[in-house]
Amino acid sequence: MEVYLDNSATTRVRKEVIDKMVEVLDIEYGNPSSLHKKGYQAEKLLKEARENVSKLVNGETEGIVFTSGGTESNNLALIGVAESLKKRGNHIISSKIEHPSILNVLKFLEENGFEVTYLDVDKTGKIDIEDLKRVIKDKTILISIMAVNNEIGTIEPIEKIGEIAREKEIVFHVDAVQAVGKINIYVKKQKLDMVSLSSHKIHGPKGIGALYINNSVKIRPIIFGGGQEKNLRSGTENMPGIVGFGVASKLAKENLEETSSKLVSLKKKLYEGIISEIKDIHLNGPAIEEGAPHILNISFAGVRGEVLLHALEGEGIYVSTGSACSSKKKGQSHVLKAIGLRGDLIEGAIRFSLGIFNTEEEINYTVAVLKEKVNFLRKYKRR
């Protein structure tokens, strides 16, 4: 049996998405900038996709700017606003558990004259709203906090942050790559100025993403060219990717409640199976009912996570030891360090991330194999 439990890294593409992308590649292959019929048909498809993606965050269609993925969206949001507002101030607020595509951009901005405050988080991964209020300065121009943490599934209080940011007239950016399709995002109600999205986390293709931008936000482009995407992201549009992203977004929006309910059920079953069958485990991050529906991070004491990962792989089970964007690099997880986890538990951490194609049968199989492998590795270590 093959069990894919690394859906936070990437997801299997839906059949409906593939079929529509093939149609664009084979039949509707025009450039939306062209003035002839093929170009007009492509422009229609582009508009439809933009509408579908905007509905995923309950925002205006015009707010969607297509990018190459979540990383580019984060770069455009942070660098674009920082450059646009640097005459007003140079202070940015974020957290210690952001994705590398945020943290590395912030490092770049620090090297170029910007000041960044990194908020601490509690043992569940949440920031403290009072801490946020305390660090705001007159020169604060941007707050960037993720909606759902990609390693431990913490859901941050983005609506409260949005209220504070709006009151202080600070631009608020949210990395919602792990949130959309699993929890509701409302850009107006939650007062979100910019939201980063990625197709391949919601059963769409890789290499395509979007940044939702409130029309009141001033932002400078970081890619220059022919003026596509309202001059904010020049370059011929990746039409197969964009259309695929649109279909994936439409399906994710239509099935959000059903998907979320299914993922919560599978997550609880997996956790309950693990705690009933395996001793000395530690849940990392929020309580089961408080975190994102699809992410479960558990440390197995006395076992190295990477060794367990490969032991599971040998039985057809695919998991992760952390963020796919940083798991091949040396060093411990910055997220698990930030929540105060001790070193041996960081070493023994495994992230299970669920998707729409997972089944209860797969969960039962995973628990049985986990029990066998963890017990074997612990005995082997003691020898």
Image: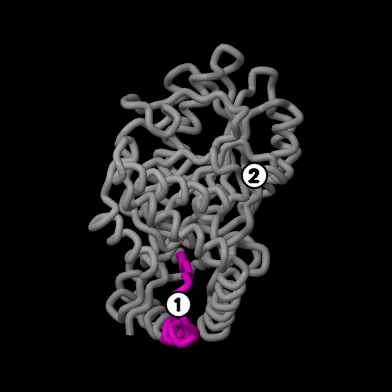
The quarter holding residue 253 reads: bottom right
Q: Amino acid at mark 1?
A: Asn
Residue situated furthest left in the rendering? 26
**Which label's residue is closer to the chain start, 2 or 1?**
2
Point out residue 204 in the picture as x, y percentages from the top left corner: 40, 59
Name which residue lies at 54% across and 83% down.
Answer: 273
Which of the image's four quarters has the C terminus? Answer: bottom left
Q: Amino acid at mark 2?
A: Val
Q: Which is nearer the eye, 178 or 187?
A: 187
Q: Tell me if mark 2 has few (under 14), some (14-19) or many (20+) residues whose alpha carbon lies within 10 angstroms of its own.
A: many
Which of the image's four quarters has the N terminus? Answer: bottom left
Residue situated furthest front in the rendering? 37
The quarter holding residue 379 reads: bottom left
Q: Which residue is mark 2?
A: 187
Q: Can residue 18 be seen here? A: yes
The quarter holding residue 61 reads: top right
Point out residue 206 in the picture as x, y percentages from the top left corner: 34, 54
Q: Which is nearer the eye, 93 or 15?
A: 15
Q: Which mark is residue 308?
A: none
Magenta stretch in the rendered image? 351-368
Q: Which is nearer the eye, 171 or 321?
A: 171
Q: Secondary structure at mark 2?
A: loop
| Residue 178 position (above or below residue 81) | below
Point out residue 239 in the picture as x, y percentages from the top left corner: 33, 48
Q: Tell me if mark 1 has few (under 14), some (14-19) or many (20+) residues whose alpha carbon lies within 10 angstroms of its own.
A: some
Q: Can residue 304 be seen here? A: no
Q: Which mark is residue 358?
A: 1
